[in-house]
Image: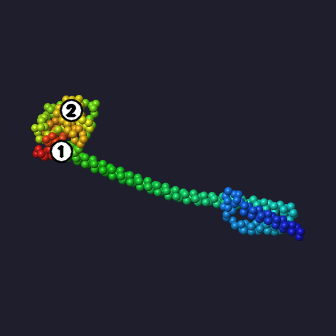
Amino acid sequence: MKSKMLLFLLVAGGCISSLVAYLIWYYTIPYFSPYGKNITDGLNVEMVVVGITVLYLFLYFSILSIRSFQTPWRSFFFVSIITLLIIILIPTFYHVKYQFGKVRVKIRTEKIHMRKLEAKIDAANKSITELLAKLESERKENDKLKEQLSEIIRKTKSLEGGHKPKEDVVIQATSNKDFPKIKTNSEADNTDLDTKNQEIIFKVQIISSSTRLATNSPQFKELKNVWEYKDSGLYKYTVGNQIDLRSASALQSVFRRKGFSGAFVVAFKNGTRIPVREALKLLN
């Protein structure tokens, strides 16, 4: 009877020690732990107290049922071990549980962040696809406009009677390049006439320059009948005074063979530039 009382007191002392240690830790750790009150969240304190009490009751009856454990030193040893484990393991359990909770929250947050990032990437890919489609459409439209412009230029050249576009082809003259020595009278079988005595004449334009050139400069050496007129802010220089388009075209061919690839026929009425088609209509 005395041994049972001692055993009961031993177990009760261990139980009380465990409960006191646990409660002191539970209510003071939030003030010392860097995690604050978050570390004690989760398990209900009442449930832990009941669990410790049940554990010691189980220990008491286990020692009573096993004769070899009923010696004072063995009983004290087992009770002490259980008490130490409770004092150490319960705070450790709380800490591990808190860390696992943090990891779960972090994983959940990362998943949410990844979903948002994937949504942004999908939106960016969609925008890039739309932009590429738009650029491709604009490229095709530009190609179509270029084709239309080329067709208009081709038709315009054709309507001007050969290679002359409706607007003057500008050839910038260079000061350090002499023109080929070309005779434009008898070699081309052309008849030069005074522009004052002719109502409509045809000339061959060879140069357009943004700066004025002297007609007696070395650039026009051995060129006869060089005549200057200004149009659209450019100084333009012609040779020849032909009364018909055929003679002017022959003169144009001569200059083109000699290196003036941009030479073309222009028409004048009383010294005023007019379209070649209009000149032909007036002659007819």
The answer to whether 20 appears left or right of 100 in the picture is right
x 18%, y 45%: residue: 275
List x then y, in percent, for residue 236. 22, 38
List x then y, in percent, for residue 243. 12, 39
List x then y, in percent, for residue 45. 71, 66
Closest to the camera, between mark 2 and mark 1, is: 2
Relative to 137, residue 65 above or below: below
Relative to 236, residue 143 above or below: below
The answer to whether 206 appears left or right of 15 in the picture is left
Label 1, secondary structure: give it: loop
Which colour assignment does the render follow?
Answer: rainbow
Q: Residue furthest right?
A: 2
Label 2, secondary structure: give it: loop
The answer to whether 80 appears left or right of 269 in the picture is right
List x then y, in percent, for residue 126. 44, 56
Give the residue pinned by disc 1. 275
x 74%, y 64%: residue: 23
Q: Where is residue 161, by image quadrant?
A: top left
x 86%, y 61%: residue: 73
What kind of residue is marked 1? Pro
Give the residue pinned by disc 2. 215
Q: Is residue 253 visible?
A: no
